[in-house]
Amino acid sequence: MTEKDPKSMLDTYLDFPRNINQLFFKKVLASNLQNVEKNAIIVGPKNKISVAPAVLTKFRMPIRKKIMIVLICVYLLICYTLKLISLTKYNKNQNLTFIYSLTRDQIYRKTKLVSLYEFLNSDRFDINKKSEIWVENKSINLKRKHKNLYVVFDIQLSLYSHQFDFRNRLNILMYIYKNFLKFLRFVSKKDANFLIAKEYIFDNEVLNRINPQKIDKVITTQSHLMFQPLIFEMKILLKKRFMLWYSSNSIPLEYKKPKALRYEVPKMIYRYMEIDQHWVWNKEHSDYLTNTMKVRSSVKGPMLFYMPSASTPVTRKIDVLIFDVTPSNNSDIYQNSIYTCDDIKKFVNEIIDACSYLEKKYRIKISVFLKPKRKYYTGHNFNYINFLADLDRTGRLKILRFDENLYDVVKVSKIVIGYPFVSPVIIGRREKVASYFYSSSKLLKMAPKYNASFFIQNPEDLQLEMEKVLVLCR
């Protein structure tokens, strides 16, 4: 397909500025990527992305979601209007670091910000100690400040009310009302307009007026892999834009049938991603991004948004510690992959069966614990969750709280077994605990070279390794 001028595609859309254009196209693709034909995605000079007009025309959004977006915009309009008369004192010389896309659980540990503060202020991230750190999150009922760390409802709204005087706020507000009215006039033309409503009406005007010298870093996570917040599209922030990978299992698995239809993030998104450097757990992930994706990366070690406890008991209280991957209730996500409910049930059952065999053979008792990565929610497969609950109820394993300190439970375990390629196995190996990835699935190729020594791929080898750790080396 010949390359189209993005402007020619927007004749029935709002007159978006260049940076919003890029975010607009990315959001369209992210909304329905699996159903978009490859030739509909156009990557032009300097990795500028555009989308074939037919994709924009066919884009549909549920009426409920469109109403919700309009209501959010009305709410924000009220907030901006009320904050025109802001009593907050602002410091023109205060530098800022912005962090986007963290979940409530990543920000707060036991409703406090201390753990996140200690994590961000560790030297590995080179965050200016005198800079204010603003973390965007909607959990307004929890504590909002700890030292130089602030949790804000919306970073752009906070900039408007804290970093501009009355005259600048008035000018910004006038443009916001103008954009809001223009949006209402064009909103019925195409559903895709709704994807960019907030950025077009509010965020762009605020960000264009902030002094880039005040911003030290802008950070997001792989939760924003398909597209990043609007501020990342601003070229004036070159060398200040970072992506923090909060897990290490981001290298694609190698399947025996690589062309089978399965949900995968397309490699091409790295070409138009506006990230100056990726922060990753280990060298393997760094090499993958650097050599395969052709983007810059830096190894930072485990990134769990908290640090290890100051003191941890050295007694090994847990014999076998399992880290699974909770399957989704969306079958399209895990088709032709190892992340089906049946495959992950098999993973857990084979570990328990190996423990039962060793208990009978040596007349010993083996304690088995499983730690979920996060709190279960409606998007998870409750068939699997009920399966675990049954195992817990019958005493075959014990389910730990999802918010247990991962470092601590790993340190008190004799052997760690994780589904490919979950992050706790990396932590276990760093802590000198016997730690292995395990899957007996026939879909996978043999383990890659970089983890072949600690990737077990059949029940017999799993049993032998557990026997060596739990019995023979006691």
Image (cartoon, rainbow, N blue to C red):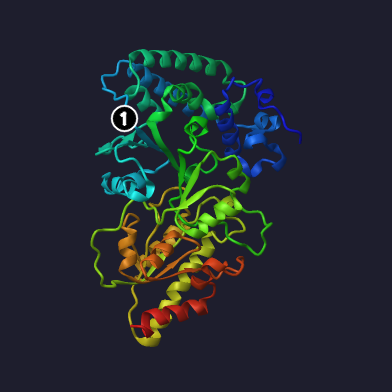
Q: Measured from the top left, where is residue 416 in percent x and y?
A: 40, 69
Determine whether, in the image, residue 18 is placed left or right of residue 119.
right
Q: Is residue 295 above or below residue 206?
A: below
- Three-letter amino acid code at disc 1? Gln
Find numbered disc 1 in the image and state the secondary structure of the residue it sits on: loop
Question: Can residue 289 be seen by looking at this rendering?
Answer: yes
Q: Is residue 195 above or below residue 273?
A: above
Question: Can residue 263 be seen by looking at this rendering?
Answer: no
Residue at the (26%, 22%) spot, across then down = 89
Residue at the (49%, 61%) spot, across then down = 421
Q: Are there few (<14), some (14-19), or many (20+) residues within 10 Å of tag 1?
A: few
Determine whether, in the image, residue 226 is placed left or right of residue 372.
right
Determine whether, in the image, residue 149 is placed left or right of residue 136.
left
Q: Measured from the top left, where is residue 100 in percent x and y?
A: 42, 38
Q: How many numbered marks have been drawn onto this rendered protein structure?
A: 1
Q: Is residue 291 above or below residue 204?
A: below
Residue at the (55%, 32%) spot, across then down = 23
Which residue position is annotated with label 1?
94
Q: Measured from the top left, where is residue 220 in percent x and y?
A: 44, 41
Specify the quadrant that holds the C terminus: bottom left
Q: Measured from the top left, where is residue 285 in percent x and y?
A: 51, 56
Specify the quadrant that holds the N terminus: top right
Q: Given the current orientation, which residue lies at the most extreme right position?
A: 1
Q: Is residue 347 above or below residue 31?
A: below
Determine whether, in the image, residue 159 is placed left or right of residue 9.
left
